[in-house]
Image (cartoon, grey):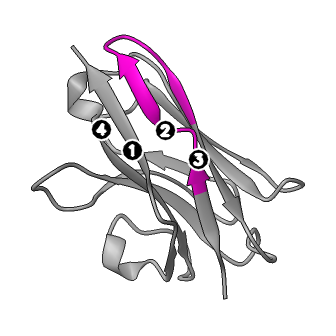
Amino acid sequence: QVQLVESGGGLVQAGGSLRLSCAASGRTFGRYAMGWFRQAPGKEREFVAAITRSGNIYYADSVKGRFTITQDNVKNTVDLQMISLTPEDTAVYYCGAYSGSYYSRRQYEYSFWGQGTQVTVSS
């Protein structure tokens, strides 16, 4: 069993920055790829970024160049640094753990999820 807890969300103006953090219980890293997803009101949960067990990183095109995913194996956290935020980034952001062989952009393939953290970007 893996427990994930996100933090760091909030209200920010367009052009601003936020850093989200996902704290994982147990021996998560090395067993799971970790992903960040987001869900805006009335929309499906969508892939944002992922880091594989070997440290390879992938981003959605919409956030490439603005978001950075990092992993701290000592603290058992995976962070999402977000810059140049726009109102279109407004969503609940979720951290997920994927037990498959590499990584996935499909949210239904993730085994564990955190409760989410709200990010609101005002114009």
The kind of residue tagged 3 is: Ser
Question: In front: mark 4 or mark 1?
Answer: 1
Q: Could you tell me if the residues under marks 1 and 3 are in contact, i.e. CB atoms within 8 Å?
A: no
Q: Could you tell me if the residues under marks 4 and 3 are in contact, i.e. CB atoms within 8 Å?
A: no
Q: In the rendered structure, which segment of residues is drawn in magenta?
A: 6-19
Q: Mark 1 falls on what kind of element? A: strand
Q: Earlier in the sequence, mark 4 or mark 3?
A: 3
CA–CA distance in space, label 3 to label 2: 6 Å
CA–CA distance in space, label 1 to label 3: 9 Å
Q: Nearer the viewer, residue 100 or 85?
A: 85
Q: Which residue is mark 3?
A: 7
CA–CA distance in space, label 2 to label 1: 5 Å
Q: Mark 4 falls on what kind of element? A: loop
Q: Which residue is mark 2?
A: 9
Q: Which mark is residue 61?
A: 4
The kind of residue tagged 2 is: Gly
The kind of residue tagged 4 is: Asp
- State left or right for residue 80 relative to residue 41: right
* Dot 1 crowding, Cα within 10 Å, few <14, some 14–19, many 20+: many
Question: In front: mark 2 or mark 4?
Answer: 2
